[in-house]
Amino acid sequence: MVSDAPPFWWTKADWRAWSLYPVSCLYGSIAGRRMARARPPQVAVPVLCVGNFTVGGAGKTPTAIAIARAAKAKGLRPGFLSRGYGGSLDQTVLVDPHHHRADAVGDEPLLLAREAITVISRRRFQGAERLVAEGADFIIMDDGFQSARLAIDFALVVIDSDRGIGNGHVVPGGPVRAPLRQQMLQMSSLLKVGRGNAADPLVRQAARAGKPVGVATLLPRPMPELQASRLFAFAGIADPTKFYRTVQSLGGEIVATRDFPDHHYFTEDEMADLMADAEAQQLTLVTTAKDAARLRGHHGAAASLLSNTKIVEVDMVFDDPQAPGKMIDETIQRARARRLQAKQAR
């Protein structure tokens, strides 16, 4: 579980990572074999997957949204396919951002649904078919790179430049989801997010393997109302410190912070404490769009907290503005080749 990721995953490998090494090897062997041997079912439209090497946030959702906007600019009708992390619905569901709540469909699907048709399904192929039935002609799969449940035409792997791949060990000794060699083989392109250097070894490895490497930055939308304000920042995401740096870049003074696990659903007591502590110190509450998505649609303390909190929206900005469009074009070309090959094999 992402929300249960231990802190030692993101530091230099120590005795905890090495003591779990035999289990990591077994897990990695199974995950790698599954990726190598996968022959997943195909859908009739192009499929671009936005994934990452590791458990934990790297900027997949903002990247997927940026690609969807580029697809719409090309006249396509993109659709998002998500597993719906944290949701309670097991069936394939078309997400309605005006009707569903995060506890039913997950927080990230609600953010995606603001941009394009979004379907959640633990069965990727059925979810993709539902998107096609709803009129989507280009599928953007949010995560699922290692799961091999649906044929992928283009696999974009996003890596955070500050965290990289943590201690480099495979789950459970570290955050890596499958052996890097196998992931590199399946990857179409690598996207480095940010200006840090933790991802540079993977960038060099990708370049040696002949994989294209792009660079992008998560930029907050201007919020002049935060400048010179005394703030209480809280976040339930994989890396809250990244959010706090973003808030500071907007000119606010962070006086207090409170971290929660990724995808965390706030309890009544937690929400009451946040509001009480902010009021006592005369601070303005500020949080992420993903945290806000988990508060929307509720009454009582959740509605009160949401109305008293500033929401920071971010956009993924590519160094090469043409990069999303190029990836979309390549995805379409690969899908045509895939369909032709399947037709000839009949």
Image: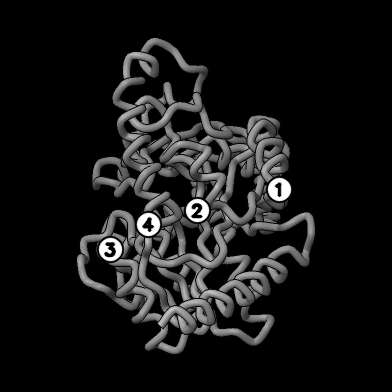
> Which three-letter amino acid code belongs to the residue tagged 2?
Gly
Q: Nearer the viewer, residue 107 or 340?
A: 340
Helix, strand or loop status at disc 4:
loop
First in sequence: mark 2 vs mark 1: 2
Marks 3 and 2, how far apart in space? 16 Å
Mark 3: secondary structure: loop
Q: CA distance from mark 1 to mark 4?
A: 23 Å
Q: Position of residue 56 (x, y in %)?
A: 44, 41
Q: CA distance from mark 1 to mark 3?
A: 33 Å
Q: Is residue 251 left or right of residue 14?
A: right
Which amino acid type corresponds to the residue marked 1 in the rendered image? Gly
- Residue drawn at x 60%, y 41% as measured from the top left: 160
Going from N to C along the chain, the mark reached first, 2 or 4, is: 4
In this image, 61 relative to 273: left or right? right
Q: CA distance from mark 4 to mark 3?
A: 17 Å
- Camera-side residue: 295 or 9? 9
What secondary structure is found at the residue carrying circle 1? loop
Q: Which mark is residue 210?
A: 1
**Circle 3 is placed at which residue position?**
122
Q: Earlier in the sequence, mark 3 or mark 2?
A: 2
Q: Position of residue 288 (x, y in %)?
A: 50, 51
For the C terminus, which image quadrant? bottom left
Q: Which residue is mark 4?
A: 38
Question: Which corner quadrant of the image does residue 335 belong to?
Answer: bottom right
The amino acid at mark 4 is: Ala
Measure how far apart labels 2 and 4 are at the Cα level. Answer: 17 Å
Residue where numbered disc 2 is placed: 51
